[in-house]
C-alpha cells in the first residue's frame, strides 16, 4: 500500500490597494510651501517620491520645491507575494516667482498733470499701484498730485505677492 503525505497549503490573496489621488494646491509662492495629501483610503503606507527622487511616507507632504511629486499606496501582506501597490498618482507643483514691477514712467510732472503708471515687469500676475505703503488705497485712474507724492506698486498672482516698489513723483509748481 502506498502512503500519501498530506500537506496543508495556505493560499493568501493579496490585499487590493485602493486607487489614490493627490489633493492640494499645485502652486506655491517663492519662499513658501504647499501641502499635498492623499485621501485616507489607504490602509497601508503612502510613499511619496519628491522631484529630487528622495522619498517620504505619510498621508500628507509639504512641498517646497517645484517639480513632480508621486504617491503610491503600498499594502504589505503576510508574505512577499501578498503585497499590493496602488496606481501611481502624480501632481506637478510650480513655484510662482513674481518679479517686482518697474517704476513710473514720468516721475517729474507739472502741477495738474496726470501721472503715467507703467505695467511693466508683472507678466505672471496683476500689477496694482497704491497711494500708501500699507497697500490699502489703490490709485485713481487719472492721478494728478499737486505736491510730491509717493506711490507703491506690487505684482499679485493668487495669494502670492512680489516685493513692493515705491516711487516718488515730484511736482513742478
Image (cartoon, helix red, strand yellow):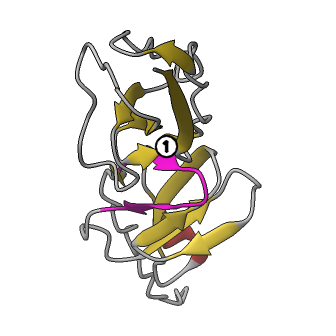
Whether residue 89 appears in magenta in the rendering, the answer is no
Which residue is located at x 40 percent, y 75 percent? 12
Asked if residue 161 is positioned above or below residue 128 in the image, the reply reads below
Q: Is residue 107 left or right of residue 147?
A: right
Q: Which is more toward the observer, 83 or 23?
A: 23
Q: Which is more toward the observer, 34 or 30?
A: 30
Which residue is located at x 56 percent, y 47 percent? 163
Res 118 seen here: no
Whether residue 36 appears in magenta in the rendering, the answer is yes
Asked if residue 137 is positioned above or below residue 114 in the image, the reply reads below
Q: Position of residue 154 (x, y in %)?
A: 46, 38
Extent of the magenta region = 25-38
Element type at mark 1: strand
Which residue is located at x 42 percent, y 54 percent? 86
Asked if residue 12 is positioned above or below residue 154 in the image, the reply reads below
Q: Position of residue 87 (x, y in %)?
A: 44, 47
Q: Position of residue 91 (x, y in %)?
A: 48, 42
Would you name the residue on which mark 1 appears?
90
Q: Position of residue 36 (x, y in %)?
A: 41, 60
Report the number of discs: 1
Q: Which is more toward the observer, 40 or 143?
A: 143
Res 7 seen here: yes
Neighbour tally class for label 1: few under 14, some 14-19, many 20 plus, Cα within 10 Å: some
Amino acid at each position: 500500500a502506498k502512503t500519501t503525505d498530506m500537506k496543508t497549503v495556505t493560499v493568501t490573496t493579496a490585499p487590493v490597494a485602493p486607487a489614490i489621488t493627490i489633493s492640494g494646491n499645485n502652486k506655491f509662492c517663492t519662499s513658501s510651501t504647499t501641502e499635498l495629501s492623499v485621501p485616507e483610503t489607504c490602509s497601508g503606507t503612502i510613499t511619496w517620491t519628491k522631484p529630487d527622487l528622495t522619498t517620504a511616507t505619510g498621508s500628507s507632504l509639504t512641498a517646497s520645491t517645484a517639480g513632480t511629486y508621486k504617491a503610491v499606496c503600498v499594502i504589505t501582506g503576510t508574505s512577499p507575494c501578498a503585497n499590493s501597490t496602488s496606481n501611481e498618482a502624480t501632481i506637478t507643483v510650480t513655484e510662482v516667482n513674481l518679479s517686482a514691477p518697474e517704476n513710473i514712467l514720468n516721475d517729474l510732472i507739472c502741477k495738474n498733470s496726470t501721472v503715467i503708471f507703467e505695467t511693466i515687469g508683472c507678466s505672471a500676475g496683476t500689477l496694482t499701484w497704491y497711494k500708501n505703503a500699507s497697500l490699502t488705497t489703490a490709485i485713481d485712474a487719472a492721478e494728478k498730485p499737486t505736491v510730491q507724492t509717493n506711490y507703491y506698486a506690487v505684482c499679485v498672482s493668487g495669494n502670492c505677492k512680489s516685493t513692493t516698489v515705491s516711487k516718488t513723483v515730484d511736482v513742478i509748481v
